Amino acid sequence: MTFSLVATDLDGTLLRADHTISARNRAALARVTAAGAKHVIVTGRAVAWTRPVFEALGYRGLAVCGQGAQVYHAGEQRLLTSVTLDRGLARLATERLTEELGDVRFAVSRDGLAGEVVVERGYRYESVLPVHVVQDRDELWSEPILKLYLYHADYDDDRLTACARKICTGLVDVTHAGTGIVELLPPGLSKAIGLSLAARKLGVKAADTIAFGDMPNDVTMFKWAAHGVAMANAHAELLAVADEVTLSNMDDGVAVVLERLFPDI
């Protein structure tokens, strides 16, 4: 197999549990670019939360952030595209979810290069990345947003995702992006949409793309790319559509595949 575009998710895929990138994965990505191929980061994180990874990698290419909402040029530090979630729809979705599920808590990822993640009281999060806590839910809608996060103490991620999809049908799309991360997105938005835009700008086709991921939010990316590689730690929903399964993110699973496809030169 020969590929001219390598698309990698970050958390649970390219990054280790401590949110760092191993030396082996760095070296494997260097092989990719040395061979003349492109590397595109495709992440659920918005640009503001992805910048530490750009800096650690010295990454200057295109990146797809915010589940496809943002296509960002890291070298030029500018947004090429940005899709926001209608705040009226987001508010209506929160009302329906609260009515049906009871004590649901919410957070938002704000639009823009410096967009904050804003959480209301009672929203449980385990991120090492910075968040802004607000006292009033209405503050969530004070600025344009990319997406909405939801949390319920009595529901696991899969059950909450399934319930939210049923309740929010016709309003917003729902995806599961990581442990404790269930998100509401603009209708039709996905990583595949953002990746296809980035690939078009790079002059690369889906048939030339290999993608790596670990969660259900990577399913659309796998379906778009010619070859999808799931990590050993991947969610069952992604494993079901993967073309290949590699080692876990803690065992440099991305590098294992890239070393095979891009021999050292």
Image (cartoon, grey):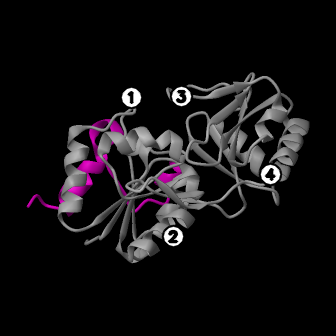
- Measure how far apart labels 3 and 2 are at the Cα level: 29 Å
- Classify 10 Å Cα crowding around label 4: few (below 14), some (14-19), many (20 and above): few
* Residue 51, quarter of picture: top left
Residue 163 in the image: above or below residue 211: above
The residue carrying pointer 3 sits among few (fewer than 14), some (14 to 19) or many (20 or more) residues within 10 Å by Cα, namely few
The label on residue 18 is 1
Q: Does the magenta segment cover residue 85? A: no
Give the mark, 1 or 3, whose residue is nearer the N terminus.
Answer: 1
Farthest residue, direction right: 99
Mark 3 or mark 2: whose residue is earlier in sequence: 3
Which residue in the protein does label 2 denote?
Answer: 197
Q: Which residues are magenta?
A: 236-265
- Nearer-N-terminus badge (2/1): 1
- In this image, 258 relative to 139: left or right? left
Which tag is nearer the camera, tag 2 or tag 1? 2
Gap in angstroms between the C-alphas marked 2 and 1: 30 Å
Left or right of residue 67, residue 261 in this image? left
Determine which quarter of the picture holds residue 14. top left
Label 1: which secondary element: loop
Query: What mark, if any, has residue 102 been given in the picture?
Result: none
User: Between marks 4 and 1, how big is the CA–CA gap?
Assistant: 34 Å
At horizontal 46% and vertical 47% (from top left) the residue drawn is: 214
Of discs 2 and 4, which sits in the foreground?
A: 2
Q: Is label 4 or label 1 in front?
A: 1
Between 214 and 113, which is closer to the camera in this rendering? 113
